[in-house]
Each structure stands twice: as structure tokens, then as C-alpha cells.
Amino acid sequence: MTALGGMLRTDARRMARDRFLIAMVLYIVGISVAMRWILPWLASELLTRTGFELTPYYTLIVSHLVIQLTPLASGIVGAFLLLEARETRMVRALLVAPVPLTTYLALLGSVLLLSAAALSVMQGAVIGLAVPPWPALIGASVAGAPSAVAMALFVGGIAGNKTEAVAYLKICGTLPLIPSAAYFLPEPWQWIATVYPPYWASKAYWIAHEGGNWALWVVGGGALSALWMAALGKFFLTTARRT
């Protein structure tokens, strides 16, 4: 545990030195504060100028920010930390060290999960618009948090350098549009999006805001996300052994 603690402290120092990663966290905090006032202002302007009523879409907009986009910030941090660990040969060393690589990945993944869930809950609380009750907000945030780990494992495993990582991150950044697009589909066509685990978290958020039974969607999303992370974990290990 002492060795793992040292690795995580090293990761924390790397993050503190990286202005891009710091900017990502500050962006999440900034957009949370701004949306509390931007959404009502935008809704008023659209209604006055075009007659379009935006308020029925508050739930979709806020859930997209809180449940889908926020975990990406933690995922980006995790991806760059794993990529740097590969570049410095730390990953290679862990393959033959007493502390196995799987243990390090499990610990880093837990940190990413907790940070993503906490950021999502914080953002929902700060925005304060179209937010479900606290238990549902926490449940949906936890169900959406695994996307941070999935992104970190995928990009950290497939990218050969930081330039490639940015390109892959841009591709991954389009995936949160899947739940938002599915929102406009009638059921059961909307359920096509269930193959994408974070959709379950958004669905739980929407149902909770309407007063429905959201817990089953959180449990289902959590189970599917566990399989998702396990598969990507094996992918990262396979890549690490080849490099």
C-alpha cells in the first residue's frame, strides 16, 4: 500500500504541473456556475425573440452537462496519467514488480470514479436547475462516473503519445451525444442507446426528475459499466505487455 500511495502522490504531482489538466477542472467549475444564470437568460431571450420555449429541455441540457460531460474531465486526467506512466516505463515496471499493474489500475480507477461522481453531484447542486432529488442525483452521478475510467483505459492504452491522445479524446468527446440524441426518440426506439452504458445514467436522471422509478436504471447501468470497464482493462493490459 505504501508503494501504491507513492504512485498516486506522483500522479497528483504530475497533474499539478500540467496546466491543461488544471484548466479542465477549472472549466467544469466555471461552467457549473455560469449555467445557473445562462440557462434562464437564454430561455428568456429565445422566448422573446423567436417564441421558442427552452424550459422543457432544461432536464436534457443539465443532464448532458452533469451526467455525460463532467466525467469526461476525470477521464481526460486519467488518460494522460496512464499515457505518461507508459512513456516513463512505470507501467512496464509494474508488470514484473511485487505490486501488480492490475492493483494500480484498480486504485487509479477508484480515484477516477469517486472524483467523477463527486464533480457531477457538485455541478448539479451548483446549477440548481432541473435537478432531481439528492438520492437520484447521487445515483445517476455514480452510474455515469464509469465513463471516466473507460475513457482513461481506452485512450491511455491506444494512444502512442499526447498528440494521438488528443485526437482520440476528441472522438470520445462525441459519444455523450448518443444519450442526448436518444432523448428525442420514442420508446422503445430510445432503448437502442442502452448498448452505451452512460445512457442508463441519463435515463435514470430523466425518470427521477419526472418522479419515476430511477433505481433500476442505476443498477442496470452499473452492471453494464462494470463489464465495459473490465473489457477495457484487459485491453489496456494487453497493450501494456506489447510496449
Image: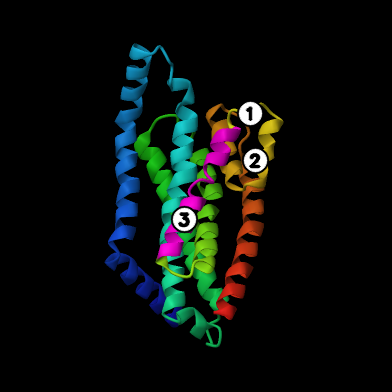
Rendered position, 212 above or below 85 = above
Q: Position of residue 40 (x, y in %)?
A: 34, 24
Q: Residue furthest right?
A: 188
Label 3 sits on residue? 169
The answer, for residue 78, to whether it is visible in the render is no
Image position of 112 (left or right of 237)? left
Secondary structure mainly formed by the magenta segment: helix
The residues tagged by marks 2 and 3 sit, at their Cα atoms, a distance apart of 21 Å
Secondary structure found at label 2: helix
Tag 2–tag 3 contact (CB < 8 Å):
no
Of residues 106 and 84, which is closer to you in this image?
84
Do the residues bearing badges 3 and 1 touch, measured as CB atoms within 8 Å?
A: no
Element on which disc 1 rests: loop
At horizontal 33% and vertical 53% (from top left) the residue drawn is 25
User: On the rendered structure, is 161 left or right of 202?
Assistant: left
In magenta, the rendered stretch is: 163-182
Whole-Å distance between the Cαs marked 2 and 1?
10 Å
Task: Inspect the image, locate mark 2, and give the three-letter code of the amino acid beneath it.
Answer: Ala
Instruction: Identify the mark at residue 212; answer none if there is no mark.
Output: none
